[in-house]
Amino acid sequence: MWHFHCDAMVRNILLLLMISCLCASAQQSRSADVRSDQFSAVWIAAPQVNLNNYGVFHFRKSVQLTVLPEQFIVRVSADNRYQLYVNNVAVACGPQRSDPGHWRYDILDLAPYFKKGHNVIAATVWNQGKHAAWAQLSLQTGFWLDGKGAASVANTDTSWKVLENFSYVPLSNAMHIIGPFEQMYAQRFPWGWTGEKFDDRNWRNAVETETAMTFGKGVANGRQMLERNIPMPEEKSQRFNSIRRVSGISIDQDFLKGTKPLKIPPQGNVTLLLDQGTITTAYPELLLSGGAECKVTLTYAEALYSDKNGQKGNRNEVEGKTIRGNQDVYILDGGTNRFFRPLYYRTFRYVEIKIENHESPLTIHDLKSSFTAYPFRERARFSSSDTSLKRIWDTGWRTSRLCAYETYMDCPYYEQLQYLGDTRIQALVSLYVSGDDLLMKNAISQFGQSEVGDGLTQSRYPSNKKQVIPPFSLFWIGMLYDYHMLGEDDQFVKGFLPGVVKVLDWHRQYVNKKGMLSKMPYWNFIDWPKEWPWKGDENISGLPASALTGNSAVLTLQYAYALNSAAALFRSLGRTAEAKSCAQQALDLNTSTYAACWDPGKGMMADSPEKTEFSQHTNVMAVLSGAIPVKAQKQLLLEIEKNPDIIECTIYYRFYLVQAFKKAGLAGQYLSLLRPWYRMLDLGLSTFAERPEPTRSDCHAWSASPVYDLLATVCGISPLQPGFKVIRIAPEMGGLSWIEAAMPHPKGEIKVYLKREKGGLTGLVTLPKESSGEFVWGQSTIRLKAGTQKINIKGN
């Protein structure tokens, strides 16, 4: 937590500084002189503690400056995490989450925070120990700060002072996956410790624990250190939307605006239910005075639960519902202007504040939060004659934003893990909307680094709980292909081709005499339809029966789909022989699977040669892999979409259903495929959920796919050549009378405005510099060039 002791005169100024200076404003430097392979500082830690246990530590270093430096460039890292301060001002948080073999550090310029004379650099460092988030890898507790030239005076060594903070007690969270929440005893906290006037004479000197090693030059089991390759998270102050329920006190709504404090008399229990209005990822912030021995409990939830049936129901409704979820607890010391903020951000729409057991008056001066996420910018836009699509766009983009921090994440509330199945979809969304490819490249790299001994990637990474889903390794190949088409870094792509070969070769060893995949190890997850539920064991959940026995059509066809993507990659990068081999293997798999699993009576593919189970998933992959003859694809997809007896794709796999519709020339049907998303909006969701009701997660990355498809399918914007050098615009407007959109491109911006006119189409299309393309509408194809051009296609 950020904790400061301040008087009322400086409180508002200090809070403003904390908000404005955090993370994004840390002035991350790009100075060449600090990128040397030579580190002069060492890792330090507190003496005589177990460096693998849970612990929160404060480090301080005094720096005397007779002249203010123009720059004071340092590299900073910690294990697990740190929060850095200079002279009582929060400067940066980190490091970027990765693994010991690729441990990240931040480059910061501390000069703007210094003054002449006595200065203090301070850091909170914490290790989650046995309570660690699954996404958190660790070597041992440590802090490291390294400066060049004059900044070397701040290097970590035994001159740094350190204190272990015993005011924190870890609290388990609902899923035991995202790391501990906190019970904090204010009486034990060293208030004011980040300031220059704090007396640290009783603190101990730090001990040196390790030599800092650059990537590729350290020992195999030590930290290999690399510069951060993504920007710092953003932070932005925000206020709660409303107070939905109050007990034990009357309250003025001005309290939420921060213009009027809430005064609570002693010996009463008070409960407030606050509604953010939408799910958010943020640091809750409380400024309190008094209330000695008072217990303040914050409970965080995406939604409330019905007292009758335990279901969430409409997310906007609170009557007859109860909150349950993760909690932080503060035990107050009665001090003045105590600022409480957890070590790590929380996810919530609703927050219940429960105040108990206080014997003296308590004043809540302010209660708000600071939104944080990866700093994507919404550079794309979409509007149309159907205003309801704006709600789909806004909700989908919010979903995508909340599922990205230092990695992509499946969900911010329950797991915060970067899963490949989610990440491929979310990377397309973020690249189309923001144009920022850094988090996508980071994800591709991390999955490449996650390789297990037999050649597959892990299904989620970074993760201290190894999990392997072979179909997700195949989607990693698809993700690399996506980047190749939309990005500009061929050298980056080439570096992962050996990993592509390993994933394909692993699958090839399981091709049997039928020409299909036999039973494979690990968890061969496909989707979450009700017919493939969670069964208490991941290896048998979320997959068709044939995945457990062998000869699974969907798994075999996904392998063929990945082979086709690999063939396109190899062909584009001049590796012709490998491209031909992959294409032939895909053809062979398609041919054998079609022969074994096509049911002429039903007019569709079965999930296995026994033809006892039929799913949309198998038929979707049959279209995408090319197993279904082109002339038969439309009829097949229309049949599986309306057939009530077939196993349906849920929200995740409907992304691939849409891609199959596009491939078959049915993109004009897309808007009718949005029914599950409209149902979520009708239930009051402010983000899109993991699966149809009842759902665990109300915010899940893979459900944001409509944001991509409104641009890529409705507007029809896609790359025709690698690097997005040639642009195809083939709009499929369905029942829309007009659309207007823009999206970022490596060379600028693509703009589209189109309107139906008397059976034809008119409008404007703008392509960025150094690009060309084609516009396709029905039987008409128009060549496009850089700049703005009119579209005028007459009706028949």
Image (cartoon, rainbow, N blue to C red):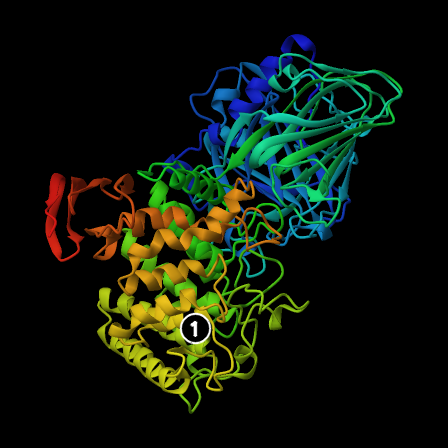
Image quarter of residue 43: top right
In the current view of this chain or complex, which residue is farthest to the top?
Answer: 9
Residue 46 image offset from top left, x and y in percent: 72, 40
Residue at x 21%, y 68% (from the top left corner): 574
Depicted 192 relative to depicted 310: above or below: above
Q: Is residue 445 left or right of residue 43?
A: left
The residue singled out by tag 1 in the image is 618
In the current view of this chain or complex, which residue is farthest to the bottom?
Answer: 513
Residue 668 image offset from top left, x and y in percent: 29, 55
Q: Nearer the viewer, residue 741 or 111?
A: 741
Depicted 145 relative to depicted 574: above or below: above
Image quarter of residue 13: top right
Residue 545 seen from this side: yes
Residue at x 64%, y 37% (from the top left corner): 317
Residue 221 image offset from top left, x and y in percent: 58, 60
Count residues near mark 1 (Cα–Cα under 10 Å), then give few for <14, some for 14-19, many for 20+: many
Q: Is residue 122 left or right of residue 329?
A: left
